[in-house]
Image: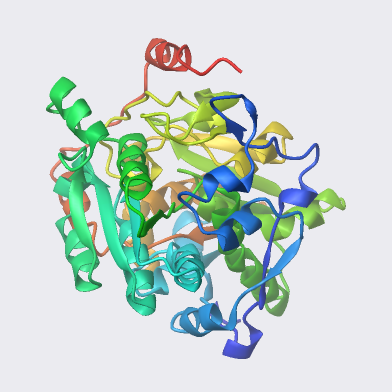
Amino acid sequence: MNKKIVLRDDEMPRQWYNIAPDIPNGLKPPLDPETNEPMGPEKLSAVFPMGLLEQEMSGERFIDIPEEVQEIYKIWRPSPLVRATNLEKALGTKAKIFFKNEGVSPVGSHKPNSAVPQAYYNMKEGVKRLSTETGAGQWGSALAFATSKFGIECKVYMVRVSFDQKPYRKSMMQMYGASIVASPSKETNIGRKILAEHPDTPGSLGIAISEALEDAATRDDTKYALGSVLNHVCMHQSIIGLEAKKQMEIAAEYPDVIIGCCGGGSNFAGIAAAFVPDYLEGKKIRFVGVEPASCPSLTMGKLAYDFGDVAQMTPLLYMYTLGHDFIPPGIHAGGLRYHGMSPMLSALVRENIVHPMKVHQLECFEAGALFARTEGIIPAPETCHAIRAAITEATRDLNDPKTILFNFSGHGLIDMASYDKFYAGELHDYDYPEEDIAKSIANLPKV
């Protein structure tokens, strides 16, 4: 039995898979908040290039990956599919556990799968500078890497609590030539306003998105790039599942359970989307989306139209949301601290295709430590959520020989400060109070 299955460069998928046309009962369109009417590409073109907007609204099932993007992908793709045999032994389970190792990318996570094409399409349309937000810094470092490949400037608004918790993410972004500022910052109107009202705020992705959007909207040379949530981002990530499907065939296996952690939805969509057509044709697959108990948009949020940011600058997206005013606690899985969930993933939950699960911070770090001791790879705090769920699924019935596939979305070598706090006993679990969520949801826009 092979421990890992690696495809050749020429076996890398040449197209992304767009799940939108295959979702039962479809996706609701983004709305213009001024009119509550569906928003066309014209208005969005102020902050996004048309090449990406065409993908965002496409009804095509497969979209070609440009050769220039494929060439950069080849630095780390195809990524390995690995059987977690040592973890299986430690758990005493008959389940087979496979993971897709996205931690082998230059920045150590799945994020460049979308950052590279986003930088490419902006470059093709003459864009000189991109602004973006980042939570844990994985997306910021991925976009910094991608813009360095296409000669584009990059400005990153990094959620303040992560800016303080993860200094080496900042170093990584600077290594690739990006400039980074803690959000909320004094560089934008929305940042100054929030700092005046809440000088000690830990920040949030919703605030950082507002700042990055304001930056892009007020400069002629700048467009905006988003690392998750939107359709085109989820589609770029589909290369993960498309490769995994080929690799599972080589292993003569097929997943009974597919798991990914959920913040905005891109890495879960990346591993799961390619398998959904099989499910719709009658294949039995359990899809599990894992989120933090402290930011439970899928398990405790409301399916409704909401803004993607605090300043209400985005279109209205139909998604599971905790309300755009929601400020999550500063858990160490910074990439999962977002108030909303991708419309694509939200629709899959709505149709009972994906089953959401919420887990606590400490049990995730414990799962990450067990994974590091058995499989040798230290996982990012976000990835620990998927590992926790995989362990739960594998130990429900130790004699059940089911096959589990999860997305190892990133390594934790730049997150050791979080592990320091875990071993020092300084981390704690946090359940978000229902009354606070109700208060935040009460401010949803009336549509």
Q: Nearer the viewer, residue 358 or 92?
A: 358
Relative height, residue 175 to residue 182 (above, below): below
Left or right relative to 251: residue 198: left
Residue 445, percent across and down?
52, 18
Give the residue at x 54% y 56%: 233
Instruction: Give the residue furthest to the front.
Output: 220
Relative height, residue 228 to residue 430 (above, below): below
Give the residue at x 21% y 49%: 418
Q: Is residue 90 visible?
A: yes
Give the residue at x 66% y 41%: 354
Residue 439, percent across and down?
41, 11
Relative height, residue 192 to residue 168 (above, below): above
Using the rendered view, name the quadrant where residue 425 is placed.
top left
Relative height, residue 279 to residue 171 (above, below): above
Give the residue at x 15% y 39%: 186
Using the rendered view, name the quadrant where residue 255 is placed.
bottom right
